[in-house]
Amino acid sequence: MDLIVPTAAMLATFMAILLGAFLLLVPSAIGLANSLLALFLFITAIDISGWFMSSWWDAHPEISSFRPVAAMLQMPFYTGFIWFSCFQRRSLRAQDALHFSPAVLILVFVVRGEDIPFLSFLFEAQYAIYIGAAIYALWRVRQVMKAHFVGQSASWRWLALLVASSLIAHGLFVVRTLFAASFPAGIAMTLQMIAALLVLAITVAIAFQALLSPQIFRAADRLLVSAAKEIDDCGTDESSANHRHLTAFMEQQRPYLDPDMSISRLARRSGIAAKDLSAIINQRHGLHFFDFLNRYRIEHAQGLLTESDLSVTEILYASGFNAKSSFNTAFNKHVGMTPSAYRKNLRRE
C-alpha cells in the first residue's frame, strides 16, 4: 500500500503534463479555454509531484518555496477554463489580470523570505470562491439551454463531471487535513491513497475524453455557443425586442391561420428580418419554423374543439391546415392524442 500513493501520483503527473502539451498544440476553435486547462494541468503536476519526489523538493528549497505561488494559480486557470467554455469567450480582458492578485501577493512574501500568514485559509477561501463561480457558470448556461433549446450538450455534461470530481477530490483533502491528528494512521493513509487514485482517475478521464470525443477539445459546442449568445442578448437588446414583437404579432394577428404561411411571408408581415426570425424561433423556442407555426395552430384547434360543434375537418381548415393527415400528425405530436380522441375526452369530463 505504501507504493500506491507515489505510483498513482507519478502516473497522474506524467499524464497531466502530456495532456497539457496536447491541449496547447492541438488546433482548436476554443484554443483559449484549452490553454487555461493546460496551465491548470501543469500546475497540478507540480503540486502532486510532492507525493513521490518530496525529497527532491526538500533538497531545493529555493525552488520549492515558489510552489505556493503556483498553487494559488490553480483555481483561476481551472475556473477560467469552465467559465470560458460555458460562455464561449475567445479573448482575455484587462480585468482578468485581477485573478492573479493573490498569487502576486504570495510571491511578494516568498521573495522577501517572510512567512505567509493564514496560507491554508487563503487556499480554502480561494477554492470556495472559484468553485462557486464554476458551479454558477454551469447553472446559468443550463437554465438557458433548458428554457430555449432542445437537446443536450455533451460539453456541458463533461464540464459538470469535472466540477463534481474536483469537489470530491478537494473534500477528501480537507477531511484528511482537518482530522489527520485524530484519525488512526491507517485511515489517514487510506484517504490519501483514495485522493491519489482519484486524481489519477480524473487525468485518465480527460485523456479518454480527448481520444473518444476529440471534438470537445477541437470545436465549439453548438448548444453552448447558442446559450452563450442568448445570455449576451438578454436584456433590452434588439433580439429581445424582436421576440416580444413576434409573440404579440402571433397572438394578435394570428398569421398561423394562413395555410400558405412561410417564413419569408411571416418576416414581411411582422417586419422582422427572416434571418432574425429564424434565430428567434430556433434559439428561444427550440423549434423549427413549421413546428413553431403548428404549435399555434394546434392551440387554436384545441379551442375550437372545446368551444364549438364544428367537425374535425372544418376545424383543421379553420386552424390553418390544408390536409387531414398533417393535422392529425401535428395534433398528436403536440397534444399526445388525435383530435377525435381529444374531443371524446372533453365530452367525458
Image (spheres, grey):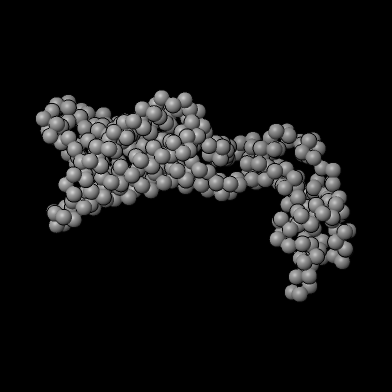
Res 236 visible: yes
Q: Position of residue 36 (x, y in %)?
A: 38, 31
In the drawing, does residue 76 fall left or right of residue 238? left
The image quadrant that residue 6 belongs to is top left
Quarter of the figure that contains the C terminus? bottom right
Res 73 visible: no
- Identify which residue is drawn at 48% across, 27% down: 28
Q: Position of residue 176 (x, y in %)?
A: 21, 51
In the drawing, does residue 16 fall left or right of residue 237? left
Residue furthest to the bottom in view is 348
Residue placed most toward the observer, 57 or 349: 57
Q: Position of residue 112 (x, y in %)?
A: 15, 26
- Identify which residue is drawn at 42% across, 31% down: 34
- Identify which residue is drawn at 43% across, 39% down: 209
Q: From this view, report whether residue 125 is shown above or below residue 107.
A: below
Residue furthest to the left in view is 59
Residue placed most toward the observer, 329 or 148: 329
The image quadrant that residue 21 belongs to is top left
- Identify which residue is drawn at 50% across, 34% down: 215
Q: Position of residue 15 (x, y in %)?
A: 32, 35
